[in-house]
Image (cartoon, helix red, strand yellow):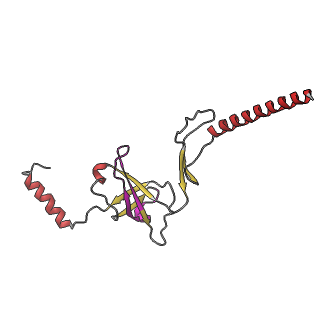
Amino acid sequence: MEHLKREVARLEGEMAAGHSTIRRLEEEIDKRLIRAPVAGLVGESANLRVGMTVVAGARLGAVVPAGGLRLVADFLPSSALGRIREGQPARLRLEGFPWTQYGTVEAVVSSVAGEVRDGKVRVEFILKPEPGSRIPLQHGLPGTVEVETDRIAPAALVLRSLSRLFASGGNDR
């Protein structure tokens, strides 16, 4: 009977050690998992090679969540703050699709960041593509966004320029 009790104690010890090893290995595996904040498609990824070390919390890529496309642009603070507002019309010209041949994509400002980040102001737009547009809109297409911040008649622009010229005494060339 004593022999069986010792055997049970030894086996229980081995079992506890095994459970401890399993928990430690699960923690090690958990440290090596790559997690995304949302489900979706990989839109961009870091240039990694076999054998490279990745620091915990490092940005390895971007995930494009399911849903409609969004247009996001970064502007210099002097161009955006106080000038770009929600609801203003905008026009997107895509680099791979010459606007003279394919046209442009209309958009509307949906939000403007209130703070500067990395020297830029983030502006988000809602796309309003024309029905039958030949531009295949998809994530990652580079382009240029023009936001209509003011609407003025050409004659008023000429008068504004002339008034500046006269105000500076003609030395503003």
| Residue lying at 49% horizontally and 54% vertically, measured from the top left | 140
Instruction: Tell me if residue 108 is in the magenta stretch.
Output: yes
Say above or below: 45 vs 51. below
Q: How many labels does the image show?
A: 0
- Where residue 4 sits, quadrant-wise, is top right
Which range of residues does the magenta coloring cover?
96-125
Q: Residue 139: x and y, percent?
A: 51, 56
Instruction: Tell me if residue 47 is in the magenta stretch.
Output: no
Q: Residue 66: x and y, percent?
A: 55, 59
Residue nearest the observer in this picture, 165 or 150: 150
Residue nearest the observer in this picture, 97 or 149: 149
Q: Left or right: where does residue 51 sit relative to residue 137?
A: right
| Residue lying at 47% horizontally and 69% vertically, measured from the top left | 133
Residue nearest the observer in this picture, 14 or 167: 14
Residue nearest the observer in this picture, 63 or 28: 28
Q: Left or right: where does residue 137 sit relative to residue 119?
A: right
Q: Residue 18: x and y, percent?
A: 77, 33
- Quarter placement of the N terminus: top right
Q: Residue 169: x and y, percent?
A: 6, 51
Q: Name the residue at the right extreme.
A: 1
